[in-house]
Image (spheres, rainbow, N blue to C red):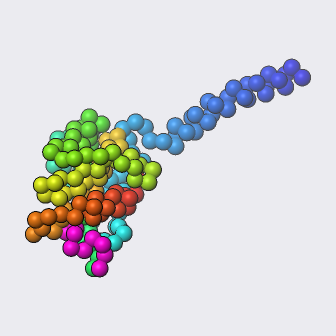
Amino acid sequence: MRKTLIILGAFLLAIPLVLGACESALQPETGESAKAPEDMIPLTVTDFNFVEKSNRVEPLFEGEEYSAVSFFTPKTNSKFENNVDHLTIHVYQFEDDASSSNMTSIFLVEVSATEIQVGEREATLTYNENNGETIVFCQQGKLVIYSLSAPPFEATTFDEEALKEAAIEGFKAVRF
């Protein structure tokens, strides 16, 4: 009986260790992503037509390894037609978390920013009153994921809600 209790006790003590090891094995390490940028870029976004995808764009920012991007235009008769010129979705891969953090600070210059929840993801939404550009972005370790909606080039006034909704739709389509 005593031997059975010892084995049972050892088993009960081991359960949390095993479960913890399984959980950490399923999650990416800090600063790492489970997917490459080109695998996260969507080819479909609600109410938009797919135009082009680039799997490997050369670095533009300090500490950037490369990025992937997809480009969309509003569908005819959609709520975005005449309010949004285009939607782009970018996923940047950086050398380290500090470089990706530095890049996200660029999005916060001279814009209003709001923390939002998109599905299960926390993100930041920015809106530029001067040019209408709207971005929804998040940092995931070495990755920076963002969706940008731009108003028609000739526009002098902007449909802020349509631009925000378009950027959110793009962010929702990212394949995390």
Q: Is residue 39 visible?
A: no
- Image: 135 above or below 48: above
The structure residue drawn at horizontal position 79% and vertical position 27%, both measured from the top left corner, is 8
Using the image as rendered, state which of residue 12 and residue 88 is in the foreground: 88
| Residue 103 image point, x, y percent | 21, 42
In what quadrant of the picture does the N terminus appear? top right
Left or right, 68 with respect to 1, comes to left
The structure residue drawn at horizontal position 26% and vertical position 34%, both measured from the top left corner, is 98
Using the image as rendered, state which of residue 83 and residue 37 is in the foreground: 83
Please check the rendered image and state whether residue 124 is part of the magenta-colored stretch, yes or no: no
Q: Looking at this view, name the residue that lies furthest to the top.
A: 2
Please check the rendered image and state whether residue 84 is part of the magenta-colored stretch, yes or no: yes
The structure residue drawn at horizontal position 28% and vertical position 59%, both measured from the top left corner, is 164
- Image: 27 above or below 84: above
| Residue 90 image point, x, y percent | 27, 56
Q: Quadrant of residue 174?
A: bottom left
Q: Looking at this view, name the residue that lies furthest to the right.
A: 1
Using the image as rendered, state which of residue 131 and residue 59 is in the foreground: 131
Q: Is residue 1 visible?
A: yes
Q: How many marks?
A: 0
The structure residue drawn at horizontal position 72% and vertical position 29%, both measured from the top left corner, is 12
Left or right, 153 with respect to 5, comes to left
| Residue 2 image point, x, y percent | 86, 20
Q: In the image, which residues are magenta?
A: 77-85
Principal SS element in the magenta part? loop
| Residue 17 image point, x, y percent | 62, 30
